[in-house]
Image (spheres, rainbow, N blue to C red):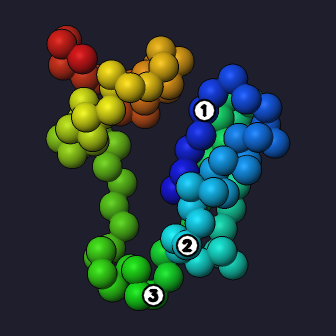
Amino acid sequence: MASIFSVHSQAALYNIARIVLDGVGDQAKEWSEWTGVAYHIRRRLSAEEQAAVGPAIDLRGTEEAIRRYEACRFVINREAVKLAKEELGPLPPAC
């Protein structure tokens, strides 16, 4: 999945998300969503990609999700941090 958030237009965000996913997954099994703030493109992995990485899982609310958030929170803007925290759910006070 590619989720792109910034001050760019909806069309620009769509194009950026498409570029990020270039060469990944099965384009025939793709769906997109414009939230008014961010553009999300979700794409199923190809059979070969799925075999290499294993089954897809929902990381929300897991320790891995928190580790991923911690790894990038200093390089994303405040609004994106807010959205990430909403997806993660309750975080330790230091976050």
- Which residue: 29% across, 76% down? 54
Give the label on residue 23, or none. Answer: 2
Residue bearing the label numbered 1: 5
The Cα–Cα distance between marks 2 and 1, rounded to whole angstroms, is 21 Å
> Residue at coordinates 60% horizontally, 32% vertically from top-left?
5
* SS at circle 1: strand
Judged by depth in the image, the label closer to the viewer, 3 or 2, is 2
User: What mark, if any, has residue 36 been given in the picture?
Assistant: none
Spot occupied by residue 59 in the image (x, y as percentages of width and height)? 31, 49
Q: Position of residue 74 (x, y in %)?
A: 33, 22
Q: Which residue is mark 3?
A: 47
Work out whether 18 lies above or below 53. Answer: above
Whole-Å distance between the Cαs marked 3 and 1?
29 Å
Disc 3 marks a residue whose amino acid type is Ala
73 with respect to 66 (left or right): right
Crowd tier of the residue under label 2, counting other residues whose Cα lies within 10 Å: few below 14, some 14–19, many 20 or above:
few
Residue type at mark 1: give it.
Phe
Q: Secondary structure at mark 3?
A: helix
